[in-house]
């Protein structure tokens, strides 16, 4: 099955000067679940190319901050935004969180990360889950008490089990598939609020 790369959301993103169509996924999530607020410190893991950073920095305003981390080179199209800090790094190798925010912790953690896909369903699902498991393991390091986590994952039985486990550490856990998600995609988004650190 194929899809048209230059679909409605792709064209819309170009017209509105966003770096990727994925902006509309985060916008739908935020409109429905109220994840982002003025003054929030936000960590965006795997931010590249940066449409989520573009949306988030507008939502948190001048008193908030967005830190984007990706293994790809820093996107220079975003470096002139005052409340944005971008790092070229594997987030698991980064430890100096206090250099980025006073207590080293964030109000919201976002992840639109996806693994390099093989086309083999089980392998791709396992790789996607592996990325998220690493984030969840690190949450006590960089997510504030009562904070929120939003992430993308390829749906599977193991992913559903991990989502059930998240209900032990978050008061609210919701699964959402934005309208802007391509019909052929197996991705879902998980919105977790009120972290019990």
Image (cartoon, rainbow, N blue to C red):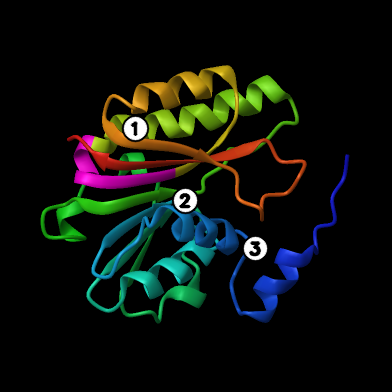
Q: x, y percentage for residue 180?
A: 66, 55
Residue labelled with disc 2: 46
Question: What label sits on residue 21 in the rendered view?
Answer: 3
Other-residue count near label 3 (Cα within 10 Å), few / some / many at <14 / 14–19 / ≥20: many
Q: x, y percentage for residue 47?
A: 47, 56
Q: Is residue 46 magenta?
A: no
Does the image show residue 50? no
Task: Spot the residue most to the front.
Answer: 32
Vertical placement of residue 156 versus 106, above or below? above
How far apart are labels 1 and 3 at the CA level?
Answer: 26 Å
Question: What label sits on residue 136 in the rendered view?
Answer: 1
Judge from the rendering whether residue 68 lies leftward or rightward of residue 130; answer left or right: left
Of marks 3 and 2, the one in the foreground: 3
- Secondary structure, mark 1, is helix
Q: x, y percentage for residue 111?
A: 45, 47
Question: What label sits on residue 169 in the rendered view?
Answer: none
**N-term mark: 1 or 3:** 3
| Labels 1 and 2 touching (C-beta < 8 A) | no
- Secondary structure, mark 3, is loop
* Part of the protein shown in magenta: 140-150
Q: Nearer the viewer, residue 67 or 145?
A: 145
Of marks 1 and 2, the one in the foreground: 1
Q: Residue at x 17, y 59 (%)?
A: 99
């Amino acid at each position: 099955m194929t899809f048209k790369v230059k679909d409605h959301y792709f064209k819309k993103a170009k017209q509105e000067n966003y770096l990727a169509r994925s902006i509309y996924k985060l916008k739908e999530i935020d409109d429905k679940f109220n994840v982002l607020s003025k003054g929030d410190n936000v960590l965006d893991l795997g931010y590249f190319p940066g449409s989520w950073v573009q949306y988030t920095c507008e939502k948190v305003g001048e008193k908030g901050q967005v830190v984007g981390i990706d293994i790809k080179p820093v996107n220079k199209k975003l470096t002139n935004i005052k409340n944005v800090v971008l790092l070229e790094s594997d987030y698991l190798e980064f430890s100096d969180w206090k250099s980025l925010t006073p207590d080293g912790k964030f109000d919201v953690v976002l992840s639109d990360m996806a693994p390099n896909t093989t086309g083999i369903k089980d392998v791709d699902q396992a790789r996607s889950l592996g990325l998220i498991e690493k984030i969840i393991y690190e949450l006590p390091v960089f997510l504030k008490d009562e904070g929120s986590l939003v992430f993308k994952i390829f749906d599977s039985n193991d992913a559903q089990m991990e989502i059930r486990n998240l209900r032990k550490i978050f008061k609210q856990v919701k699964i959402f598939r934005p309208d802007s998600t391509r019909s052929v995609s197996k991705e879902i988004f998980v919105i977790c609020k009120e972290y019990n650190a």
